[in-house]
Image: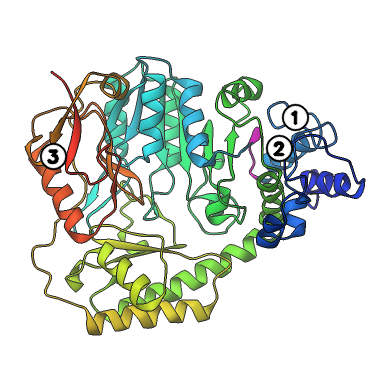
Amino acid sequence: MTNQNETPIYDAIQQYIKNRIVSFDVPGHKQGKGHKDLVEAFGTKCISMDLNSSKPLDNLTHPTSSIRRAEDLAAEAFNAGHAFLILNGTTAAVQNMIFYCCRKNDKIILPRNVHKSVINAMVICGAEPVYINPGVNTEFGISLGMSIEDIKKTVRDNPSAKAILVNNPTYYGICSNLKEIVRIAHNAGMLVLVDEAHGTHLYFGDDLPISGMEAGADIAAVSIHKTGGSLTQSSMLLVSDKIDAEDMRQTINLTQTTSGSYLLMASLDIARKNLFLNGKDIFKKVCNLAEYARNEVNKIGGFRAFGNEIINGDTVYAFDKTKLSIHTRAMGLAGIEVYDILRDEFGIQIEFGDIGNILAIISVGDRELEIERLLGALSEIHRRFRKEPMNMLEHEYINPLVIMSPQKAFYSKKRALPIEDSAGHISAELVMAYPPGIPVLAPGERITEEIIDYVRYAKEKGCAMMGTKDETMNNIETVEE
């Protein structure tokens, strides 16, 4: 065991500052000496730590000292073969998982409710998706996990696929039977890639769903900043001891910045230490707060905060009880409408709202005071804003019709069409509500009337629809046929 009290990157930075090194390198603000406004905005200590790669501070793309030590500590903390610090967000971590195992025309098995980073990775590398339609909870209008029988069939039908990608958990806290998926994939000679953008806490809390590394997955993308306490945009990519770490580093260095932020790296270092030493207590508190909030929300009326009761042993194999997912449709309000009311009327910013649900992220930074404020606001919304639940869209999952690879569609000759007239054509771009960034339509998929209806409805309810070249989303780029 190494000493998890260490913070090698942060310590190296502090020693560098103490040594009063004269800087004739970048960044140009020279630790704030050339930019007083920057110091006033961010503080002397923060700006003094914004440094450039050098021998005393190591180099992110080829680490040999403090950064390498931080990687080793993180690998031990997360029970991984190796851990990489990712500074381009978990988007880059997810994409590097795919770049590592997929080449042009290689198949990858994945659920449809993936993040847009997965689709974009396929556009870049030329991989072809084999979608497993996740289960759907029609009561809440949410996508669930992948059923084991569907995975078995898809693996049999696509024996040349390179990997299976799994969300663990989904935005709503849904987890698939990850350990069994790993067994099936490995028996078929496939890798298992796990998108754990919302699953850092699974590695450190008690009585939570299994983590990717514990389940035997090959690679996992973990967004430390979301629930682990590091600065925004900082992430980690974990690999098992069956993956050649230096091969993976070569892949990562295709996209990793060569000007790594020491602020982000130090935050990952400090967050890892805190998670390892205090994670059990941290996430026990988070679970208690979330459970209390869930019970109180369900007393208000109109709202439904769902939890372990939706576990069915297959498409909902486990539930991440730190997630406060609340269904709003019985209120006659779309989730995005509740999201807007909470912000505009009550000064409360939650993670996202979609057609039928909202998600409040609860972390160690929350207190009972904030929970009570949220509960009071939801009670007031029920009193002041509820409507009859009429003309509400039944569900948000739409079965994709894949006609060509995302790469081929994205780089095809295109023609813009009014979205209302685009049914039957092949999309050349993404369409999604963000957050959560799950595509309604991806490049290479057939546009249907159901998709057009969904987009129209989502826009009417105030969803931020993104992805199209036309920012108004009145037009969509299609493949010229």
Disc with the residue nearer the chain's start (3 vs 2): 2
Towards the viewer: 432 or 112 = 432
Left or right, residue 170 beside residue 260: left
Image quadrant occupied by the N terminus: top right
Q: The residue under label 3 is which amino acid type? A: Ile
Q: Residue at x 14, y 56 (%)?
A: 394
Disc with the residue nearer the chain's start (1 vs 3): 1
Question: From the viewer's perspective, is residue 280 above or below residue 143?
Answer: below
Q: Residues within 10 Å of mark 3 (few under 14, many from 20)?
A: some
Kindly indicate whether the residue at mark 3 contacts the one at mark 1 (C-beta within 8 angstroms): no
Q: The residue under label 2 is which amino acid type? A: Glu
Q: Give percent across and percent down for residue 42.
A: 67, 59
Q: Secondary structure at mark 2?
A: helix
* Residue 399 visible from this viewpoint: no
Q: The residue under label 1 is which amino acid type? A: Pro
In magenta segment, residue 387: no
Q: Which residue is mark 1?
A: 63
Left or right, residue 458 beside residue 239: left
Q: Residues within 10 Å of mark 2 (few under 14, many from 20)?
A: many
Q: Which residue is mark 3?
A: 419
